[in-house]
Amino acid sequence: MHWTNPAEMALHELRTAPLVRFSVLALSSIFFLVDPFAAIPSFLAITAGADPARRKRMARKGALTCFIVLTSFALGGQLIFKMFGITLPAFEVAGGLILLLIGLDMLEAKRSATQEATGDTEEAAAKEDAGIVPLGIPMLAGPGAISSVMVLVGQVPQLWHWEMGAIIGSIGVTSLTSYWVLAGADQVRKVLGETGIRILVRIMGLLLVALAMQFFVNGLTDLGLISKQ
């Protein structure tokens, strides 16, 4: 778009900048917490011996479950806050702590116990269809991803505001990417290798720790325990 008036261009930038920043924050926080790359080893163990069609079907169910669960919490987040009398600052602090614990585990290139408990993979491998549980929830849509969505929703002034569209869009992009990654898990592991996947998980963990600390600081600031700069 060509702007003839500098004032119009500046106003446009002021209006679009918050949308871009919030959209990037929403997509990065949700994607890092769902983290389909870290789920590849568990997914391959669960689907060992399965034909490609069944593997894709299970990946599709897992991704769809992830989308439904996270979208449900996004749409019902404001109601949950009101029902239990939870304030956004309190949830930011609690969510920041959860994200911090998950991020620290990711820095060691391992799945957090909040996403995958001991024995989940073995139990899922024995099931006929593990696409919904435990793949969809909690391996993809775990407590960390749900907490991140809730914190983001707490910043939305109204249910049908543009921030909500950014959150739902981020959930959709993350779920679709999760399907692609898991459906082609064999190819992804061949391309990245075990070392590449561990490095990628560690990088996501580092960014997640930084994001967790930002949530934590925002919560303490909103509570008045830290003065605004």
Image (cartoon, rainbow, N blue to C red):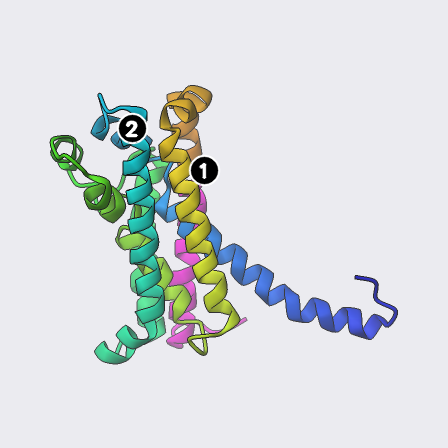
Residue 139 quadrant:
top left
Q: Main secondary structure of the magenta part?
A: helix
Q: Nearer the viewer, residue 187 or 24?
A: 187
Residue displayed at 37% across by 61% down? 149
Image mark for residue 41: 2
- Residue 146 seen in the current view: yes
Q: Is residue 212 magenta?
A: yes
Image-based side of 170 in relation to 66, left or right: right
Q: Amino acid at mark 1?
A: Ile
- SS class, disc 2: helix
Residue situated in front as seen by the camera: 32 or 56 = 56
| Mark 2 or mark 1: whose residue is earlier in sequence | 2
- In this rendering, the answer to whether 209 lies above or below 52 is below
Nearest the viewer among 74 and 184 is 184
Alpha carbon of mark 2 to alpha carbon of mark 1: how far? 18 Å
Label 1: few (<14), some (14–19) or many (≥20) C-alpha neighbours in 10 Å: some
Q: Is residue 59 above or below residue 23?
A: above
Q: Are marks 2 and 1 in contact (CB under 8 Å)?
A: no
Q: Name the spot of residue 115 as percent of width and height, x first.
A: 25, 45
Q: Which residue does the numbered mark 1 point to in the structure image?
A: 203
Q: Residues within 10 Å of mark 2 (few under 14, many from 20)?
A: some
Q: Is residue 119 above or below residue 73?
A: above
Of the 4 image quadrants, the one containing the N terminus is: bottom right
Q: What is the quadrant of residue 38 in the picture?
A: top left
Left or right: 169 as drawn, with respect to 50: right
Q: Secondary structure at mark 1?
A: helix
Find out whether residue 113 is within the magenta segment.
no
Instruction: Tell me the number on the disc at residue 23.
Output: none
Q: Position of residue 222 (x, y in %)?
A: 41, 74
The span shown in magenta is 203-229
Which amino acid, by three-letter code, is at mark 2?
A: Pro
